[in-house]
Amino acid sequence: MSKHETFAEYPPRGLAAAEATLLTIWPTLNRYHDDLVLVGGLAVHYLTKQSSGGWPGAVTMDVDLGISVAAEGGQYGTVLSDLAGLGFKPDQDHPNRLLRQVEDMALYVDFLTELPSATTGTRTVDDVIASVVPGINRALESRRIMKIEGWDIYGVKQTCELAVSDIGPLLVLKLNAFGGPTGRRHPKDAYDILLAVTSFVDGPQAALDAFQAEGTTGNTGFASAVEALRRDFGSVDADAPVRAAEFLRGTFDAQMRVREELVTAAKFLLGE
């Protein structure tokens, strides 16, 4: 299990472990770089200012990579064989997830792709099983190249130019992860949306503008993201604000502030 109900349940080194996983696999997957984009909690982490707005930063324990359905290794191997050489193998309980155990930490890698003919399910890409998620193609199209420095799982310092989903497509993906057709309604996803808007590195207004612009790009996840905003974010007693506040816990006043700010962010995302 790589997602917890509350912020406090995430181990202090969980984010560092996820980043180490990314910095380990990214150089190995170099011939796939044009077909890959970072999404999920690590993308929120890289696109937000830490402690901006007074909120704790993003947390995660896994690496989520969008992958083009056309990705192919050809004669030089496959995604799965490349990552198997680093100790990552399909999780027996979740075959669409790769797992490597390092001491007492489980390191996870998930792949997501998009198909014109389906909005749910899985698809084998190259030779990894990827979850089908509308909006991944837009994330691939609008990648932001970011220079990231850190240590890989072998303790070697790495400097990588990573392709990270830009904020508009990432918000669409996060909104659907929470309240879309196959949304999980996890408190962490609701909190990530608050962070992505209020702490975006280019400022909240840029995040709002980028999300609204997704409505003109053909993003296949945009309509359901807007529906989730209207249904689940409309008041302090709605599903998403309550769960985001529960993710942080804290005093009643602190929880109410989370709920109120998420409702305000949602209204701005809707252009209201």
Image (tube, helix red, strand yellow):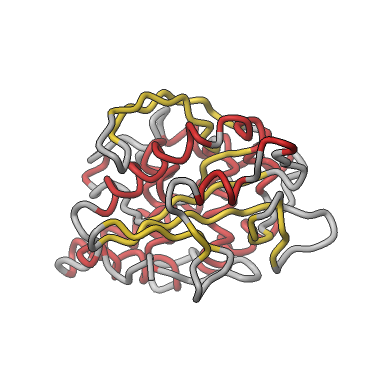
Residue drawn at x 35%, y 39% is 199
In the shown orientation, is residue 57 left or right of residue 225?
Answer: left
Residue drawn at x 58%, y 45% is 271
Above or below — where is 42 with respect to 102?
Answer: above
Q: Is 182 or 229 nearer to us in this picture? A: 182
Q: Is 201 or 2 nearer to us in this picture? A: 2
Residue 209 spot, x, y in % from top left: 56, 35
In the shown orientation, is residue 29 left or right of residue 222?
Answer: left
Residue 77 spot, x, y in % from top left: 65, 41
The residue positioned farthest toward the bottom in the image shown: 93
Above or below — where is 182 with respect to 175?
Answer: below
Q: Is 159 or 220 nearer to us in this picture? A: 159
Report which quarter residue 179 is drawn in: bottom right
Residue 92 spot, x, y in % from top left: 50, 73
Residue drawn at x 40%, y 53% is 192
Report which quarter residue 112 is drawn in: bottom right
Above or below — where is 178 with respect to 169?
Answer: below
The quadrant the N terminus occupies is: bottom left
The residue positioned farthest toward the left in the image shown: 251
Residue 235 spot, x, y in % from top left: 44, 67
